[in-house]
Amino acid sequence: MAEEKNKDIESSVESSEEMLSEEAVEESAVESTEDSVDDRAETLRPKSANLKQQGDDDPHWYVVHTYSGYEDKVVRDIQNTIRSRHLEDQMFDVTVPVETVIEDVRDKNGNIVKNKKGIAEKKTKTRKKFPGYVLVHMIKNDVTWYVVRNSLGVTGFVGPGSEPVPLTDIELLKLGIKVEGLSIDVEPGDHVRVVAGEWENFEGVVKTVNNSKRTVIIPFEMSGGRLTDVEIDIDVVQKIEE
C-alpha cells in the first residue's frame, strides 16, 4: 500500500516537472518571438531626420521617373523640401533636362507661315529632353532617398528594383551636364568616338590637342568624301582601344 502511494507521488512529481518544463519552453519561445519582433521593429523604425545614413559621402547624379507633366512640380517640391529641412549639404541640385529647338511658325490651321520672300518663319522653343524624368544631384542616404521617393508625382528612381544608380560621366555629358575635372587621356593619332553633342557617334583620328581650351581637332569625312577639321570638346571624346 505504501509502495503504491509512493508511486502515485512520484508520478505526480514527474507530471508537475513535465508541466513546468513545457511552461519554460513556452516562455522561452515567447521571449524569443518578442526579441525577434523587437529586432524587426528596430529595423523598420524610421531613422532620425538629417542624418547621413547608409550611403556614401560623395554626391552623384541620379535619374528619377515622374508622372507625365509632373516634372516641374517635382523639381519645385524637392527644392522646397531641401530648404525647409536644411538639406543643402546633402542635396545640391534638381533639374529637368531641356533642349532648344528651332521650329517652323504655323498658323491656327497648321500651315507654315512664310515671310514676303517665301521663306518659312522660325521660332526658338525650349522643350523637355526626356519627358517624365528629373535629375537629382545628391548624396544618397536614407534621408535624401526618402525626400525624393516621397515627393508628389515621383514613381521611383531609375535603376534595378528602383535602387538609385548614379549616372556615369559619359551619360552626364549626353544629358548636357558639364562634368568638372573629367580627364580623358587623348593624343594626336588616337582613334576616338564622339559620345555627345551634334557630332555624337562620329569616329575619327585626333589631329591636334589644345590642352588650354580642352579641345581636339578631328578630321571628319563629309558628303563627297572630303575631310573637314572639326573642333570638339575633349570631355565628349572617348578613346577607342585598338
Image: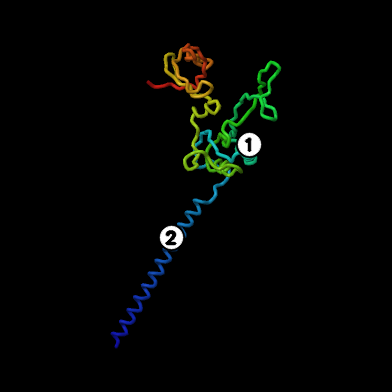
Percent position (x, y) of residue 92? 58, 33
Residue indicated by mark 1: 72
Query: What is the CA distance from the residue labelled 1 to the residue labelled 2?
Result: 50 Å
Q: Nearer the viewer, residue 134 or 21?
A: 134
**Residue at disc 2, secondary structure:** helix
Side of 168 relative to 131 (left or right) = left
Percent position (x, y) of residue 230? 51, 14
* First reached walking from the N terminus: tag 1 or tag 2: 2
Which quadrant, please, contains the C terminus? top left
Residue type pointed to by label 2: Ser
**Residue found at x 70% / y 19%:** 115
Residue indicated by mark 2: 32
Rendered image quadrant of residue 126: top right
How is this picture coloured? rainbow
Rendered image quadrant of residue 75: top right
Q: Nearer the viewer, residue 32 or 98?
A: 98
Residue 50 seen in the figure: no
Percent position (x, y) of residue 133? 56, 36
**Residue at disc 1, secondary structure:** helix
Q: Nearer the viewer, residue 211 or 208?
A: 208
Q: Can you say whether 154 is above or below 193 in the image?
A: below
Q: Nearer the viewer, residue 171 or 82?
A: 171
Q: Nearer the viewer, mark 1 or mark 2?
A: 1
